[in-house]
């Protein structure tokens, strides 16, 4: 019996206690079976059944089968799957004569039918999920964001291969695809981190701790104490005013006033989770129907094309003039408006990015005046993306805000509706993960501002550490403060390093046969054009991808250098290129330039016509 009925159901194998009892009781039963003879067998097994029924379901099954054999039962037994029925029947029975075999078989049949239904349910193809690729938002499906597109996905796969020890022609990935300074080695500003640490700590552990003066400079403690008072008892862990803490907004207002020479009210400021959140908020307010259009520079930062796709609006691209250092021309602006209207679209806003991303140009005052006149004439809201305003390197380039120019144009620009954006992710701070930033509303309808407030309220408030960092960005240590000397040295070193690396990268790219690249006067990027064989274009078309995506993927897989295909930003018809940043270390950039050179030669040989 022990040998014949040793099988156990899967769920018992997962329960050590039941399994132990099953083996013990089965062994006991087998011993009893071997020791009884003739008529004593029935009495032995009847007595055993009462004890075994208190054991596991396996023991119950074996005892019932043994009793039936002893009684000479000839009825078919239920299949091995019906452990629970046998167990309950055995427990209920005081002896072999009290077992109701008809009821047992009826219940066994019902159990088999239930088992069959469960098996059918398991093997039956599952219904499609109610939320799937066909029922989800098709606008979201169509949305693209090239900076984190397929090339970066492939880079992360390769990085996993490197960690696993797979043999590849390089030992690491050089991430030159986006403006994430601290991810590639830039150090944070010490004063900012000290104040943020003291803001996060409860006062008794930070600003009021007796050891604080020995660990932090006096101006960091003073600033953190002031910020604690602004935040209130909840500190960085509590919700704030929807537009941001008033004291922090006042710091931003003072910064803008000092920068432009013209005052601004903190009531017109929204502190946001980086500039991206502010851009999304404004575009949500601007776009009212699928027939609305927004003028966007080509090339542009993909947040604009992505959000317009998500909101269902039309992107009216105006090409920057690469031959004139990526200049904006009134003719191309007008052409973009006319083309949109010819398609039945209604232009609502115009975007400028100054300094440029991905192009690195810095607009002169005269260019901004042309854009402002155009927006006033065409009744367009001007969206001024100015997150790189601190990143200007060329001696002949100087940042001037659209707001300053508009105010100083007087009556000519008095009707301009303007929203400006800034961020803690760029400049010389590079605190991308803190998600700090702001938008400033200039001459915006109060009703629209109230609706923006409602939209911001749906997210309660922006991250408080980001608000605090925004305050620090616009109000750093001043001359005479304890931390000013160190702050100035750190910012100066970053500025000098970026200026040197921007020149080194552009010069290196221009030294490669088949490459041309404009000077990167500002921001963090170079945007070279690359000549490729016609065969490469054909292969890319056969694979259903852009030729610059083919190029960037080849560069990644052969050298480990990760860049963004230029098609993700938009470019002139027929142009091929990519965006790369000059944030990595000098040695890494020097190596990258040589990788660009080697790869381009190999790529052209591979796809030679």
Image (tube, helix red, strand yellow):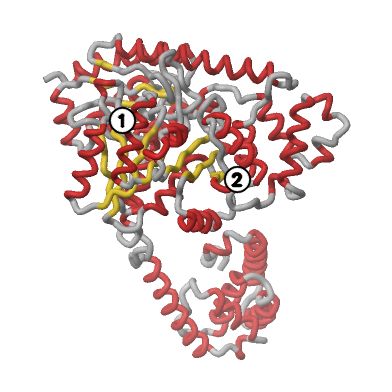
Q: Furthest-front residue in view? A: 411
Residue 601, visible in the rendered structure: yes
Q: Furthest-top residue in view? A: 511
Mark 2 is surrounded, within 10 Å at the Cα level, by few (under 14), some (14 to 19) or many (20 or more) other residues, namely many
SS for callout 1? strand
Horizontally, residue 267 falls left or right of residue 419, namely right
Mark 1 is surrounded, within 10 Å at the Cα level, by few (under 14), some (14 to 19) or many (20 or more) other residues, namely many
Looking at the image, is mark 2 or mark 1 nearer the viewer? 2
Location of residue 185 (image quadrant): top right
**Residue tagged by mark 2?**
463
SS for callout 2? loop
Q: Could you give the CA–CA distance between mark 2 and mark 1, rounded to whole angstroms? A: 32 Å
Horizontally, residue 521 falls left or right of residue 480, namely left
Residue 549, visible in the rendered structure: no
Residue 287 or residue 599, whichever sits in front: 287
Horizontally, residue 253 falls left or right of residue 392, namely right
Location of residue 603 (image quadrant): top left
Picture coordinates of residue 515, whole percent (x, y): 26, 16
The numbered dot on residue 432 is none
The numbered dot on residue 565 is 1
Residue 22 position (above or below residue 90):
above
């Amino acid at each position: 019996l022990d040998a014949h009925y040793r099988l156990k159901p899967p769920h018992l194998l997962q329960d050590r206690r039941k399994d132990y009892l099953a083996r013990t009781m089965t062994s006991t039963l087998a011993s009893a079976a071997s020791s009884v003879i003739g008529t004593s067998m029935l009495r032995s097994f009847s007595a055993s059944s009462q004890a075994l029924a208190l054991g596991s379901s396996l023991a119950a099954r074996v005892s019932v089968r043994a009793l039936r054999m002893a009684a000479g039962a000839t009825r078919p037994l239920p299949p091995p799957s019906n452990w629970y029925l046998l167990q309950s029947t055995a427990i209920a029975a005081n002896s072999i004569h009290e077992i109701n075999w008809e009821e047992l078989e009826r219940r066994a049949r019902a159990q088999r039918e239930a088992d069959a239904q469960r098996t059918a349910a398991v093997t039956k193809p599952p219904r499609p999920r109610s939320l799937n690729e066909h029922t989800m938002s098709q606008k979201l499906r169509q949305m693209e964001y090239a900076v984190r597109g397929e090339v970066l996905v492939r880079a992360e796969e390769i990085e996993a291969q490197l960690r696993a020890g797979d043999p590849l022609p390089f030992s690491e990935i050089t991430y030159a695809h986006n403006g994430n300074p601290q991810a590639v080695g830039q150090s944070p500003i010490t004063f900012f981190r000290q104040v943020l640490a003291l803001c996060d700590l409860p006062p008794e552990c930070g600003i009021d701790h007796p050891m604080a003066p020995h660990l932090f400079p006096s101006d960091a403690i003073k600033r953190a104490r002031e910020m604690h008072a602004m935040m209130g008892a909840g500190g960085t862990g509590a919700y704030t005013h929807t537009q941001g803490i008033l004291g922090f907004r006042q710091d931003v207002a003072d910064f803008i006033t000092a920068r432009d020479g013209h005052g601004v009210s903190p009531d017109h400021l929204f502190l946001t989770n980086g500039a991206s959140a502010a851009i999304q908020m404004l575009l949500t307010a601007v776009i009212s129907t699928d027939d609305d259009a927004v003028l966007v520079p080509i090339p542009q930062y993909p947040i604009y094309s992505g959000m317009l796709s998500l909101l269902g609006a039309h992107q009216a691209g105006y090409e920057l003039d690469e031959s004139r250092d990526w200049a904006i021309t009134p003719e191309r602006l007008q052409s973009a408006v006319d083309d949109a209207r010819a398609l039945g679209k209604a232009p609502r806003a115009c975007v400028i990015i100054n300094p440029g991303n991905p192009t690195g140009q810095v607009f002169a005052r005269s260019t901004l005046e042309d854009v402002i006149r155009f927006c006033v004439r065409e009744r367009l809201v001007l969206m001024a993306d100015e997150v790189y305003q601190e990143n200007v390197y060329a001696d002949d380039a100087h940042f001037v805000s659209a707001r300053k120019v508009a105010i100083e144009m007087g009556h000519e620009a008095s009707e301009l509706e303007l929203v400006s954006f800034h961020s803690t992710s760029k400049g010389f701070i590079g605190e991308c993960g803190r998600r700090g930033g702001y938008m400033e509303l200039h001459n915006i309808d109060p009703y629209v501002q109230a609706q923006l407030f409602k939209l911001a309220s749906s997210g309660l408030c922006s991250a408080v550490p980001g608000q605090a960092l925004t305050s620090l960005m616009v109000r750093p240590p001043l001359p005479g403060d304890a931390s000013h000397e160190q702050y100035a040295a750190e910012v100066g070193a970053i500025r000098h390093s970026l200026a040197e690396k921007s020149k080194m990268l552009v010069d290196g790219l221009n030294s490669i046969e088949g490459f041309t690249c404009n000077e990167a006067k500002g921001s963090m990027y170079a945007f070279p054009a690359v000549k490729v064989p016609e065969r490469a274009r054909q292969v890319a078309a056969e694979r259903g991808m852009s030729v610059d995506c083919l190029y960037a993927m080849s560069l990644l897989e052969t050298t480990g250098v990760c860049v963004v295909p230029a098609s993700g930003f938009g470019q002139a018809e027929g142009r091929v290129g990519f965006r790369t940043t000059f944030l990595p270390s000098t040695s890494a950039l020097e190596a990258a330039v040589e990788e660009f050179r080697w790869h381009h030669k190999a790529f052209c040989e591979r796809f030679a016509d």
